[in-house]
């Protein structure tokens, strides 16, 4: 065993997976062998969920069955809906979502079963139910919040129908569908790894997804998309991008939506979502968010050498789609749940407990003094 410590596990191959390939040199990204550019341009999110879970793209009859299953699995227990609506609106929506998934786990029909078939059923249910959980957690509590789970066939159209303050058109649905595809999977990122660690003790799917949600919440991971929008709103108040960034640089603060542990240059997902941020701004006659973003990107590239990650332009896309800022990271969950569940299935199918070592740096060989004999400090 080597004594070398890799802080943050940087550069470590911690396992094998056939789900997603991130090429750290070219930046290329593929799911089950299909390039992200092709999936984003041509596929629906539901096809991508099928691909991640089953390993292949569906043929039309299988896809129809799968889509119907997703739609018919959307409902959540009505008492859970009531519980979630009672959570104070000041509570972080990721905390509430974590609780909701934990609750669903206790009532899941396959409770206690970790077989491949049961895991697949749980994966489909969890993916289908996530939008209903977000509707229950929407702090703006639209009057039609309790909108029928059958509001629309596609996941993207359904999410917009239940969460957006605006009437969605086909382009908005395409934009959200694309964001969902881009967010769906990224090999051993922190939340997926957390989910796999939980699954590796032969704990259950819902427990693993709760671990994933708790890990995604942090601003260094999924929480970044909300932080980006808060930054853009602050920039708008100040009205000067350069002045805003100067202050952040002087305080040595991180600029959210930039940098990546694996991708040190272009993130291909950012290039795709950036086009939607620009186009949506033009269609909605609200180009300022994209303009601020582009200025921030140029300064970050030139002065710091950092490139935007997926969260950066996604914030503008979600904002222009009329989605509440407090739900941006939960929206990430709506998509990443597909990747997480695929990884839990893969972990259980070829399980070995994940249990690394650490190098001990604390004190050693101290003499134990009984409590009654210890001096007061
Ligand atoms: C994602 C992230 C955690 C990856 O970082 P990493 O590869 O582990 O790099 P480190 O956290 O070790 O940071 C290395 C250096 O780059 C700096 N840095 C990293 N990201 C930065 C950012 N977004 N803005 C400013 N500086 C940044 C750090 O401050 C550190 O500087 P130092 O060496 O002078 O202390 C990091 O880039 C980050 O915090 N980004 C902002 C949050 C974000 O967008 N998260 C979503 C990720 S997809």
Image: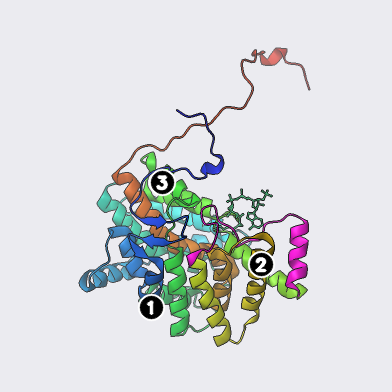
Residue for point 68% across, 16% down: 371
Q: In this rendering, which labeled residue sits more in front, label 1 or label 2?
A: 2
**Which one is nearer the viewer's eye here, 50 or 11?**
11
Q: Is residue 377 above or below residue 80?
A: above
Where does the magenta region start and end? 240-268
* First-in-chain label (2 vs 3): 3
**Which one is nearer the viewer's eye here, 143 or 352?**
352
Dot 1 corresponds to which residue?
152
Q: Quadrant of the C terminus?
A: top right
Q: Position of residue 144 (x, y in %)?
A: 49, 78
Residue for point 38% across, 56% down: 20
Which mark is drawn over residue 230? 2
Separation of marks 3 and 1 at Cα, in angstroms: 32 Å
Separation of marks 1 and 2 at Cα, in angstroms: 30 Å
Q: Position of residue 16 (x, y in %)?
A: 36, 46
Q: Is residue 284 above or below residue 254?
A: below
Dot 3 corresponds to which residue?
196
Q: Is residue 255 magenta?
A: yes
């Amino acid at each position: 065993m080597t004594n070398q410590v890799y802080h943050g596990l940087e550069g470590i191959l911690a396992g094998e997976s056939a789900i997603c390939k991130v090429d750290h040199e070219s930046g290329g990204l593929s799911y089950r062998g299909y390039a992200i550019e092709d999936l984003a341009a041509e596929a629906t999110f539901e096809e991508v969920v099928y691909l991640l879970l089953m390993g292949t793209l569906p043929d039309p009859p299988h896809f129809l069955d799968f889509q119907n299953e997703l739609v018919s699995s959307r409902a959540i227990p009505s008492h859970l809906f009531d519980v979630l609506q009672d959570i104070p609106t000041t509570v972080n929506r990721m905390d509430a979502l974590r609780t909701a998934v934990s609750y669903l786990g206790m009532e899941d029909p396959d409770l206690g079963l970790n077989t491949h078939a049961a895991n697949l059923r749980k994966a489909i249910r969890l993916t289908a139910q996530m939008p209903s959980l977000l509707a229950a957690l929407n702090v703006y509590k639209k009057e039609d919040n309790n909108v029928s789970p059958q509001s629309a066939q596609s996941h993207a159209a359904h999410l917009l129908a239940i969460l957006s303050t605006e009437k969605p058109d086909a382009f908005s649905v395409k934009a959200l569908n694309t964001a969902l595809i881009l967010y769906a999977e990224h090999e051993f990122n922190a939340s997926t790894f957390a989910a796999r660690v939980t699954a590796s003790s032969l704990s259950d799917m819902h427990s693993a997804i709760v671990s994933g949600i708790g890990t995604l919440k942090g601003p260094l991971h999924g929480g970044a998309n909300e932080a980006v929008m808060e930054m853009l709103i602050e920039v708008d108040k100040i009205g000067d991008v350069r002045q805003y960034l100067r202050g952040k640089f002087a305080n040595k603060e991180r600029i959210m939506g930039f940098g990546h542990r694996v991708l040190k240059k272009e993130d291909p997902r950012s290039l795709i979502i950036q086009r939607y941020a620009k186009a949506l701004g033009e269609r909605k006659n609200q180009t300022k968010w994209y303009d601020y973003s582009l200025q921030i990107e140029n300064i970050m590239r030139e002065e710091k050498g950092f490139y935007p990650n997926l969260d950066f332009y996604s914030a503008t896309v979600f904002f222009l789609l009329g989605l509440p800022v407090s739900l941006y990271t939960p929206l990430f969950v709506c998509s990443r749940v597909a990747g997480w569940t695929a990884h839990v299935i893969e972990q259980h199918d070829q399980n070995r407990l994940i249990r690394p070592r650490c190098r001990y740096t604390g004190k050693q060989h101290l003499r134990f003094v009984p409590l009654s004999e210890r001096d007061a400090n």
